[in-house]
Amino acid sequence: MTEIPSSRVADKVRIRADIAAMQPYSPTASLEVFADQLGIPAERLIKLDANENPYGPSPRARQALASLNTTHIYPDPEARALRALLSDYVGVDAGHILAGAGADELIALILQLFVEPGDTVINAPPTFSMYAFDAPLAFARVLDVPRRADFSLDVDGIEAAARASGAKLLFLCSPNNPDGSLIPPETVERLLDLPLVIVLDEAYIEFSRAESLARRVPETPNLIVLRTFSKWAGLAGLRIGYGIFPREIIAHLWKIKQPYNVNVAADAAARASLADLPALRANVERLIAERERLERELAAIPYLHPYPSRSNFVLCRVTGLDAAELRRRLAEEYGILIRYYSTPRLRDHVRISAGTPAQTDALLAALREIGQTSEAE
Ligand SMILES: *Cc1c(COP(=O)(O)O)cnc(C)c1O
């Protein structure tokens, strides 16, 4: 390859300065990439790092994918069939529902719709990383109002920040990723009085046994609720999510969304999933039971301190043992993948997704062994 003098490239190729200065980012790798890195066959890895559903799609969704014969035709830009089924599922008129290539696409789309350069959005970390990731790309300034030590929202802090900044959007996640706590509905109600739009991310609501706030959207002009098929329905790899939006907001979203954002495979699998709810709900119940078992059993491991969770994962503080080292040993010695955080607030924490009972058995055995073979008390 011949080197092109960089001064000449810079004359012609003018990358946005803020993106040129960004550090590259590495999302969680696929099973195959981990298998390569660790030298362990993919089918022997236990992947508990991304809150994916170990039971996979429902039988009907697998069948719909196997018999798909429309991959040569563009999808319906309005995803009408899917939105009609979603209307029954969430109990809101289809006119309030927009489907996306994962809830992730909708987060970026919402920011595009509201933010003009320099506008502020409020974030409540620790929380799902995509809000703070997408906001600067949409030229928004992110104002952090950190959650309290128990991961509850600093409601007074959010109100003060909203008043001082004139923020247009507030991102809330309930149950919150990474700790699994629910935001009490009264808290959301109180924050809805602020002069901004709340984006309430309910990616894990199916695991919470709590009521979704989706039905509140039609009568609430400043509430957006985001949902996804990635976790409860086992479709993470297909990228299919949706939002419930007030009329005044959805009318404008329709104008800016990519016409074919939901692919035909994702659309077919999502519709089949909604026709197979008993099977999927049985899997959700299994995962809730495993999460409850994890909370109990992890609390009995001296170096782990789990937080109560209403989701399909458990966040633990790690003491007497380096959390990054724990993640490394589980992966390299046992082929078990868990989530570790390098941010200052969560440096001594790990998040473990609920898996199958056999996966929990293997995880607990490994954690006990590591406790015996390290300095951890
Ligand atoms: C996993 C996750 C999402 C991503 O949803 P997709 O539909 O897969 O894009 C959104 N929000 C939270 C809080 C998540 O943990």
Image (cartoon, grey):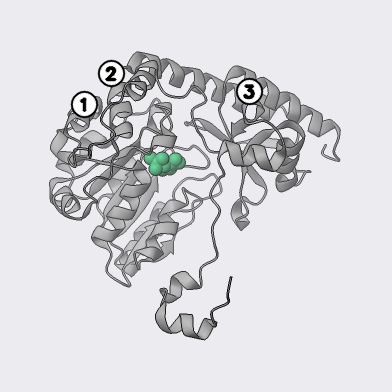
* Crowding near the residue tagged with mark 1, few <14, some 14–19, many ≥20 C-alpha atoms within 10 Å: some
**Within the image, what quadrant is residue 306 found in?**
top right
**Within the image, what quadrant is residue 74 found in?**
top left
Q: Helix or strand or loop: what does disc 3 sit on? A: helix
* Crowding near the residue tagged with mark 2, few <14, some 14–19, many ≥20 C-alpha atoms within 10 Å: some
Gap in Å between the C-alphas at discs 1 and 3? 33 Å
Residue 327 placement (x, y as % from top left): 70, 41
- In this view, the residue in front, 348 or 325, is 325
Q: Residue 359: which disc?
A: 3
Residue flagged by tag 1: what amino acid is it?
Answer: Leu
Quadrant (top left/top right/bottom left/bottom right) for the N terminus: bottom right
Q: Residue at x 43, y 32 (%)?
A: 231
Q: Helix or strand or loop: what does disc 2 sit on? A: loop
- In this view, the residue in front, 174 or 65, is 65
- In this view, the residue in front, 302 or 375, is 375
Residue 86 placement (x, y as % from top left): 23, 29
Question: Is the Cβ of the residue at disc 2 closer than 8 Å to that at disc 1?
Answer: yes
* First-in-chain label (3 vs 2): 2
Report the residue marked by disc 2. 275
Residue flagged by tag 3: what amino acid is it?
Answer: Gln
* First-in-chain label (2 vs 1): 1
Quadrant (top left/top right/bottom left/bottom right) for the C terminus: top right
Q: Residue at x 59, y 37 (%)?
A: 32
Question: Is the Cβ of the residue at disc 3 closer than 8 Å to that at disc 2?
Answer: no
Q: Helix or strand or loop: what does disc 1 sit on? A: helix
Residue flagged by tag 2: what amino acid is it?
Answer: Ala
Does the residue tagged 3 have its C-beta within 8 Å of any atom of ligand 1?
no
* Crowding near the residue tagged with mark 3, few <14, some 14–19, many ≥20 C-alpha atoms within 10 Å: some
Report the residue marked by disc 1. 85
